[in-house]
Amino acid sequence: MKKAATLLTLCLIAMPLFGQKKAPAPPAIGSDVASKTLKNGMKVIVWPDHDIPNVAMFVWYRVGSRNEYAGITGLSHFFEHMMFNGAKKYGAGEFDGVMEANGGRNNAYTNQNVTVYQNWFPRTALELIFDLEADRMQHLAFDEKVIESERGVVYSERRSGVDNNNNGLLYEQVQAAAFLAHPYHIPVIGWPSDIESWKHEDLVRFFKTYYAPNNATMIVVGDVTPAEVFKLAETWIEPIPAQPPPDPIRTKEPEQLGERRVVVEKDAQVPLIQMAYHSGAATDPDNDALDLLLTILSRGESSRLYRRLVAEERVALDVSMFRATAFDPSLTWLTATVLAGIDPARVEKIIDEEMAKVISDGVTEAELQKATNIAAANFWRSMRTISGKAQSLGNYETFYGDYSRLFDQPALYDAVTREEIQKVAAKIFRKTNRTVGTLVPKQVAAAQETN
């Protein structure tokens, strides 16, 4: 009887209570993101995150060196500076001063495709930041003294980041050689003669065309509600008039039919190698497989290229790879710092051998699983902060035209197969599809000429 009671008790414990409901599943990540397009064409995207009483506001303008041409190269980067130098309500230096006085900070960056202005601040300053952004978007000042001052600052950045930076100089040369027709051959910092000769009318026309609300997207993440952000956007941003849309970029880069080479001789301690392979735009369906392949080849000490070049052969100090995120077909880069006294040709030979192995044999299941795990970890790590969320939302909305694709990304990486990785390797990593740049120390080049 005692045994029967025990069995009955166990059965009752194991059985769900009659009428008990299952606990609701937690909401899917991103389900609370909301968006609204203002009457002037600006899209505002809001992701509430109430963990801390702070806010990240990123304003993405769809303008970069891709939108420039001979004579005005570098203007996108120049305006990254100018947007902090005074408008109608807040004068020179006041943007930073007012923001910092209210507990905020800011930054900005420019690349070939976009210019992004980043603000981080307490939620108590939310309306003030809208006021600041609206002022410079509509009433940016074009004071000649400020223009000349910033022209000098930009030129100084060019000297430090390109002319006197071996990696920057080689990158600029390889980029220019890799693109014959498309404006991606233009350096973001601009060519020296253009920096020296921008005209006032160039600046005014460029600003009016590209810094219009209909050419921008605002991302707001943090201790806010969509309703209050949309109301502030309607108050401060919506009255700013839209402008005619910029002319589309129609030029397409012709297929590369043979390997191109760039050699730079310069004062240096060690040689450098950069390889630029043509690859797809941000929306290219091969990119998920390509991302995982780049991880297998170059991320971490167990990656294929690091093991061969750094750990085993000891011919390089480092090696890395990355894929450019771009509106148009762009480049996938490989960079390596060669050890002093090592012939760069030896490093290049090892790289070619590893690429050939991937093309002929593919990757292992263990390598694919590791790369997928790293991709998942990176994704969730980027979601930990309001800044990471704002950056990710902006990337997907800007380059895909749909921020919601961000939340599909882990599943897309999980779906990649070994066959897809081998296929993309054969497509991208062909010698005829690349531009190879080598920076040779002057003393080494002189010795080679003597011999």
Image (cartoon, rainbow, N blue to C red):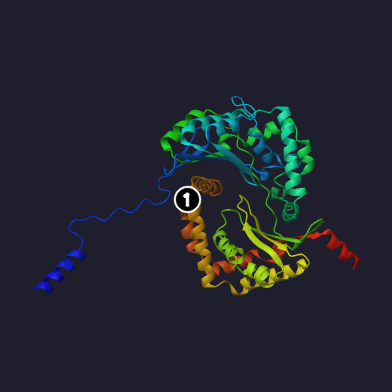
Q: Nearer the viewer, residue 13 or 295?
A: 13
Q: Residue at x 78, y 36 (%)?
A: 197
Q: Position of residue 23 (x, y in %)?
A: 28, 54
Looking at the image, the residue that sits furthest to the left is 1
- In the image, 78 versus 396, the foreground residue is 78
Residue 377, how many percent across, how many down? 49, 59
Q: Is residue 272 visible?
A: yes
Image quarter where the N terminus lies is bottom left
Q: Position of residue 250 (x, y in %)?
A: 66, 47
Quarter of the image with the C terminus is bottom right
Residue 290 is left or right of residue 122, and the answer is: right
The correct choice, above or below, for 202 with respect to 329 in the image is above
* Residue at far right of view: 450
Quadrant assignment, res 51: top left
> Residue 19 lies in what quarter of the image?
bottom left
In front of the other: 38 or 105: 105
Residue that numbered label 1 is attached to? 384
Q: State the image quarter where residue 428 is shown.
A: bottom right
* Residue found 43% across the figure and 34% down from its top: 228
Residue sitting at x 65%, y 31% = 85
**Total marks in image:** 1
For mark 1, give the secondary structure. loop
**Relative image position of residue 411 (x, y in whole percent):** 46, 59
Name the residue type under label 1: Arg
Near mark 1 (Cα within 10 A), the count class, few <14, some 14-19 or many ≥20, is few
- Can residue 237 be seen by looking at this rendering? no
